Image: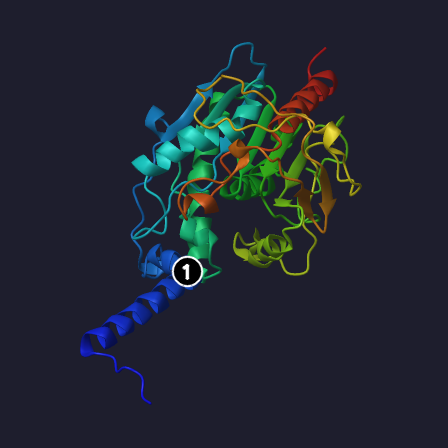
């Protein structure tokens, strides 16, 4: 006995349901690829007309310009921010993009420039940054866009150092900004003995860089009672081996000709910010000086720190760490925002303490008696 036959309306209904189901499943599976493709400028970088260059003699070219917190110390801090511009039609972000500036001022500066506020006057240039898309692909166009950002940071540094002709200096950058600070160390600071003498430390946060690739004149920090050295690390959550593999696979580093090339089989640098050393021994959570979510805080306001929560270990060149359970330490926002620097800093207190300790060492050794 035959079952009931589908009517034409039922047939179209079930077909439509199946198509919607397949489309929804496809979007779920390939959503990242779809959104990533939407950020692709779809034009070769060689034919791209970049945004106008900033004038670092003007205050508008700086997100922070010699900003001082109460009771700040004697150092001058040059901070280069991470990716805040999503992209789309542009390989490099224009100066003054409202959305990018809002993320910079609300998220990046309080969480990542904040740990250096007590050292002294902090300056952070705006620059024609490589877009978020340039961090998600290894295409030559993306590499050129990231390298293009270097010229702005180099120009900003010259303007900044002219305003600070003497005294201790600290260089710091996070993600893309750390990548550019590393090149500053190689090409500007390492080649100038006077600048090397003034360097308290350089902080390359959330950056993959070769352990043996820094200048011999500016070594990695191997202990906390050391100045004139580099604290560099790339954090990955404990147990997130997939993210660790992706980070190393996508890592690009500078070569001698100023090009970004694959890390290859070189070991990355890992200086644990909790201990200020290159030790690969596990570090218990009780030594962590404090994580924080400082998003939205005004400049100079010191956030509350959650201490003794994050266990760490330098392993395979990456800083592996445990994750706090609190809701404030969760990635928020849309797909693009979740691929930028975290809207919190697990090592705020550690970096703050490390920088203050190294400044004290510099003052004891290098300051005139």
Quadrant occupied by the N terminus: bottom left
Q: Nearer the viewer, residue 263 or 11?
A: 11
With respect to residue 16, does 88 lie above or below?
A: above
Left or right of 190, for residue 31: left
Quadrant of the image occupied by residue 296: top left
Frontmost residue, 354 versus 255: 354
Location of mark 1 (residue): 28
- Within 10 Å of disc 1 (Cα), the crowding (few <14, some 14-19, many 20+) is few
Residue placed farthest to the right in the image?
Answer: 281
Instruction: Return the x and y of residue 360 as percentages of the image width and height.
Output: 70, 18
Instruction: Please determine whether, in this image, residue 337 is positioned above or below residue 17.
Output: above
Secondary element at image label 1:
helix
Judged from this view, the residue extending furthest toward the front is 1
- Image position, residue 350 (x, y; %): 66, 28
Q: Position of residue 248 (x, y in %)?
A: 61, 55
Look at the image and tell me in which quarter the C terminus lies: top right
Compared to residue 365, the image places residue 213 above or below, namely: below
Q: Is residue 158 visible?
A: no
Residue at x 77%, y 32% (from the top left corner): 223
Residue at 48% x, 39% y is 82
- Residue 337 appears in view: yes
Is 194 on the left-hand or right-hand side of 162? right
Nearest the viewer among 123 and 57 is 123
């Amino acid at each position: 006995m035959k079952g009931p036959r589908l009517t034409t309306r039922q047939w179209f209904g079930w077909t439509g349901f199946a198509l919607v189901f397949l489309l929804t499943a496809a979007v779920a599976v390939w959503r990242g690829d779809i959104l990533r493709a939407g950020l692709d400028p779809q034009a070769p970088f060689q034919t791209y007309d970049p945004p106008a260059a900033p004038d670092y003699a003007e205050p508008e070219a700086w997100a922070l310009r010699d900003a001082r917190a109460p009771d700040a110390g004697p150092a001058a801090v040059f901070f280069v921010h991470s990716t805040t511009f999503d992209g789309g039609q542009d390989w490099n972000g224009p100066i003054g993009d409202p959305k990018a500036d809002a993320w910079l001022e609300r998220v990046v500066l309080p969480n990542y420039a904040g740990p250096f506020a007590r050292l002294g006057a902090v300056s952070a240039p705006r620059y024609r940054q490589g877009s978020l898309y340039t961090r998600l692909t290894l295409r030559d166009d993306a590499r050129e866009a990231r390298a293009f950002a270097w010229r702005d940071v180099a120009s900003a540094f010259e303007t900044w150092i002219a305003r600070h002709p003497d005294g201790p200096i600290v260089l710091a950058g996070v993600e893309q900004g750390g990548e550019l600070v590393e090149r500053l160390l190689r090409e500007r600071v390492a080649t100038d003995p006077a600048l090397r003498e003034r360097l308290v430390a350089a902080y390359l946060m959330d950056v993959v860089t070769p352990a043996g690739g820094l200048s011999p004149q500016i070594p990695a920090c191997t202990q906390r009672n050391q100045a004139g050295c580099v604290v560099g690390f790339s954090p990955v959550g404990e147990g997130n081996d997939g993210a660790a593999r992706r980070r190393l696979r996508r890592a690009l580093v500078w070569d001698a000709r100023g090009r970004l090339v694959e890390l290859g089989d070189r070991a990355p640098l890992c200086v644990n910010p909790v201990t200020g050393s290159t030790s690969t021994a596990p570090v218990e959570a009780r030594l962590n000086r404090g994580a924080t979510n400082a998003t939205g805080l005004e400049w100079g306001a010191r956030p509350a720190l959650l201490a003794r929560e994050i266990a760490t270990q330098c392993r395979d060149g990456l800083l592996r760490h445990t994750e706090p359970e609190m809701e404030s330490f969760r990635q928020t926002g849309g797909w693009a925002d979740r691929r930028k620097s975290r809207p919190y800093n697990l090592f705020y207190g550690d970096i703050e303490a490390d920088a203050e300790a190294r400044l004290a060492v510099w003052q004891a050794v290098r300051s005139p008696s």
